Amino acid sequence: MALRKILTDGNPTLNKMCRPVTSFDDRLATLIDDMKETVVQANGVGLAAPQVGVLRRVVVVDLGDEIVELVNPRILEESGEQDGLEGCLSVPGRFGMVKRPNLVKIEAQDRHGDWYEYEGEELIARCFCHELEHLDGHLYTEKAYRMLTEEEYEALMKQNREEDE
């Protein structure tokens, strides 16, 4: 496994449509393993292949107790609504408020090509939507209805810490 360089906003690769994965081989396994290592090292929640310069429909999402591998994912259902803060490894140091569904059901393949379904709520639903948008060449900043200043972000983080105590 190896760490991959995360591309940042302004890199044209981030705005391109990804192609479906058709070969479930060692190259795919290496990509997924590298993405898993990269997202953990970067303290991220999710990472899409175009963020590491690969225009394939591959995403990893760190659920805390496991990292879900999503190959050729698509949203089957979404319901409810949530409003919350988002950031992105490809948009370092910037945060914005984004409305997302509260529940998302997806279909994806694993690294071997087998199809499965996964359902996520709240943060996981938000992450699924965020990462799948990367596969279509979009960043959350396009969807954010308000970007926070550094001072607003720090105040929000302070408030969250105080509520957790």
Image (cartoon, rainbow, N blue to C red):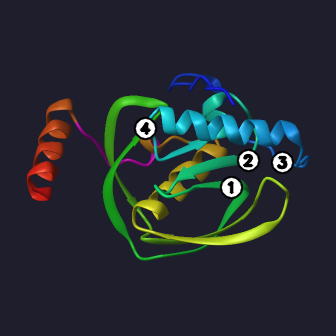
Left or right placement of residue 127 versus residue 4 in this view: left
**Pointer 1 or 4: first along the chain:** 4
Q: Dots 1 and 2: beta carbons under 8 Å?
A: no
Residue depicted at 77% across the width and 36% down the height: 30
* Residue hosting label 1: 70
Q: In the image, which disc is placed on residue 21? A: 3
At numbered mark 3, what does the secondary structure look like: helix, strand or loop? loop
**Pointer 2 or 3: first along the chain:** 3
Residue 12 drawn above or below residue 24: above
Q: Amino acid at mark 2?
A: Arg
Residue 138: x %, y % from top left: 57, 42
- Span shown in magenta: 142-148
**Pointer 2 or 4: first along the chain:** 4
Is the residue marked by circle 3 packed among few (<14), some (14-19), or many (20+) residues within 10 Å?
A: some
Q: Nearer the viewer, mark 3 or mark 1?
A: 1
At numbered mark 2, what does the secondary structure look like: helix, strand or loop? loop
Left or right placement of residue 58 versus residue 89 in this view: right
Q: CA distance from mark 1 to mark 4?
A: 19 Å
Say which of 123 and 63 sits in front.
63
At numbered mark 4, what does the secondary structure look like: helix, strand or loop? loop
**Pointer 1 or 2: first along the chain:** 2
Residue 90 drawn above or below residue 71: above
Split into 4 quadrants, where in the image is the N terminus?
top right
* Residue hosting label 2: 57
Q: Dots 2 and 3: beta carbons under 8 Å?
A: yes
Q: Dots 3 and 1: beta carbons under 8 Å?
A: no
Q: In the image, which disc is placed on residue 43? A: 4
